[in-house]
Amino acid sequence: MIRRLCVTIVFALDMNNLILAFLVLYPWAPLLFRRVFPGLNIWQQQQQFVQIGIVVLFCCSFFLKQNRVKIKNIPLAMLVCYVGIRTAENWFTATLAKGLPFPSLQFLNFLYLIIFYVLCVQYLNKKSIAQIVKWLSYSALGVAFFCVLEVFGVAQFVKELPNIYHPDKTKVFVTGMLGNPTLISGYLAMCLPLFFGKKAFNILSMSLIWIILLFYTGQTESVSLVGIVVGLVVSLYYLSQVSKRIFFCIASSFLLIIPFVYGKIDTTIFAFSGRLAVWQKYLELSKNTFVFGKGLGSVEILSTQVGKFANYRWTHLHNDFFEFTFNLGLVGLLLILYCIVEHFRTKVKLDKSGLILKTMFVGFLVNCLFIFPSFLWAFTPLAMFSYASLYVYKNQEAK
């Protein structure tokens, strides 16, 4: 009887609902796993949830019926091939021959995301994407609500999470589910498109997120520039796709206002906090391997040898494009840019959900210029879902 019940449950599963549950719940992994894996920090708990979740989804794909895939993604195939070959070559030449550390975890993480992309394209459709977008807005709003609890000092569960970074300042900062005031600003700004609309729910949610971005994020007494820039870019990009006339008017007004308000802005928000010194050092280190890179994970390995900048050991370069250039070389960077350019060149008829996700992918790319979202599990599943959704639309339109 138990066996029959298990078989019934298995065959009653729907991959669309499983992916929805996965995307909605993964930001809350630190709360869900805080008792299961108490020794892990907030980012490791998110990593555990995402990796286990993708494995479960992949296992379900062996018996759940999938859609017929009629499209090709040549740029992504080339990138996966190059990263795989480069990692294998690095394993043989560096690890076996010279006994150097082999950062296999980053390649494994990369494969997890590729599997998730394949699952999205194989199983999702326009209707399921619209449903996921709806529930993602509730999940993101929940994260914003936890930030509000932090402002009032009553976020009990957030306080109990390990390795929360909080600047020792008199100003109130929030960290949400990301453990860092700057990272949560980038995440919330990336999620802003989920609330673009004229309904009261959308307007109130956007207002709440902008209040958090403008007053309660950052590493100093000033606000975080990351969230503000990402929020402005996604807003302007969405407007440019909806109404070019309104976009032109707002963009022109914004450019005219800048010279008058620049002198009144606290310029400390434009400080790079040691980034320039770090980039200069790693640029010097990359000269001998600039074409093909040093291999995935090289930045983290070398960070122990390079030392500290601005009293901090930089395990990431806070610019993902530069970090991937260091790891995978100029060839790897060109392949990544090829994937991005081809993504935006792809012509498909997008509904509102599709446009929202495309705008969120723009927000992710802007975040890549300032922080390291490609290496944070709070960002990468959402970014890969946004990226894959365009190909879901394209596959559904293909004859």
Image (tube, grey):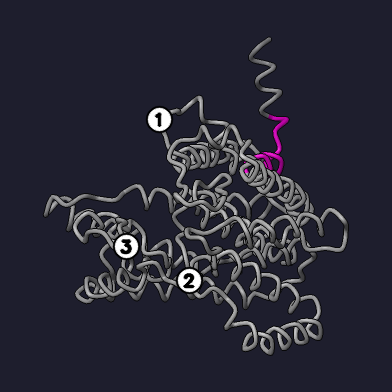
Q: Residue furthest front?
A: 170
Mark 3, residue position: 310
SS assignment at label 1: loop
Residue at left 78%, top 84%? 244
Q: Earlier in the sequence, mark 1 or mark 2?
A: 1
Mark 2, residue position: 268
Amino acid type assigned to the residue bearing label 3 in the image:
Ala
Q: Is residue 383 left or right of residue 319?
A: right
SS assignment at label 3: loop
Q: Which mark is residue 208?
A: none
x then y, percent, for residue 351? 80, 65
Residue 395 visible in this rendered orientation of the protein? yes
Quadrant hosting residue 259: bottom right
For the stretch drawn in magenta, what is the main secondary structure?
A: helix
Amino acid type assigned to the residue bearing label 1 in the image:
Gly
Start-end of magenta stretch? 11-22
Amino acid type assigned to the residue bearing label 2 in the image:
Thr
Q: Residues within 10 Å of mark 2 (few under 14, many from 20)?
A: some
Q: Quadrant of the C terminus?
A: bottom right
Residue at left 49%, top 66%? 368
Q: Residues within 10 Å of mark 3 (few under 14, many from 20)?
A: few
x then y, percent, for residue 128? 75, 50
| Gap between marks 3 and 2 measured at Cα | 15 Å
x then y, percent, for residue 182? 51, 57
Can you say whether 2 is above or below 206 in the image? above
